[in-house]
Image (tube, rainbow, N blue to C red):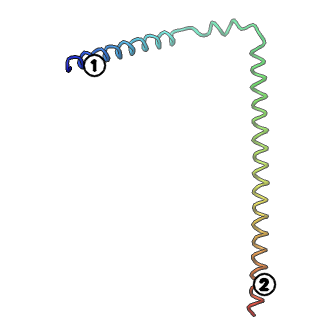
Amino acid sequence: MAKGFKVFVGLAALAGAAAAFFTLKKRKEMEEYDYEEFDDECDCDCCTECDDAAEAAQDAAETAEEAIEEASEKAAEAVEDGAESVEEGLDSIADAVEDTDK
């Protein structure tokens, strides 16, 4: 039983070493690959379409950010107004309680 386990561990270590070697080999191939050859072959208008779409998405994001800022400012103002009205209500209740105590 112990021999079988040792053989299994040895095979697993060998498989791990082979996988690591294969990974390093592929990584080196990818680093040395010339990706620039594909950049020169683009003859379509898709690149400008992508740029236009990216600009439109950025504009939409900026518009959304502005709308969020405006909404948060309005919400903050509404909270402040609500707090003021609550304070006024509490003051009027306190005045009424003082008048009944007298």
Which residue is the extreme one toward the left? 2
Q: Is residue 9 left or right of residue 43?
A: left
Q: Nearer the viewer, residue 9 or 87?
A: 9
Q: What residue sits 78% from the left and 12% below the top?
A: 45
Residue 34 badge: none
> x and y percent of residue 90 in the render?
75, 76
Q: What residue sits 75% from the left and 35% below the top?
A: 61
Which residue is the extreme one toward the front? 1
Residue designated by label 1: 9
Q: SS of the residue at dot 1?
A: helix
Q: What residue sits 76% from the left and 70% below the top?
A: 86
Rendered position, 43 above or below 4: above
The N terminus - image quarter: top left
Q: SS of the residue at dot 2?
A: helix
> x and y percent of residue 82 in the render?
77, 64
The C terminus - image quarter: bottom right
The span from disc 1 to disc 2 (Cα, nearest Å) is 86 Å
The part of the image, by quadrant, that contains residue 91 is bottom right
Residue designated by label 2: 96
Q: The disc labelled 1 sits on which kind of residue? A: Val
Rendered position, 65 above or below 9: below
The part of the image, by quadrant, that contains residue 24 is top left
Q: The disc labelled 2 sits on which kind of residue? A: Ala
Which residue is the extreme one toward the bottom? 102
Of callouts 1 and 2, which one flags the residue occurring earlier in the amino acid sequence? 1
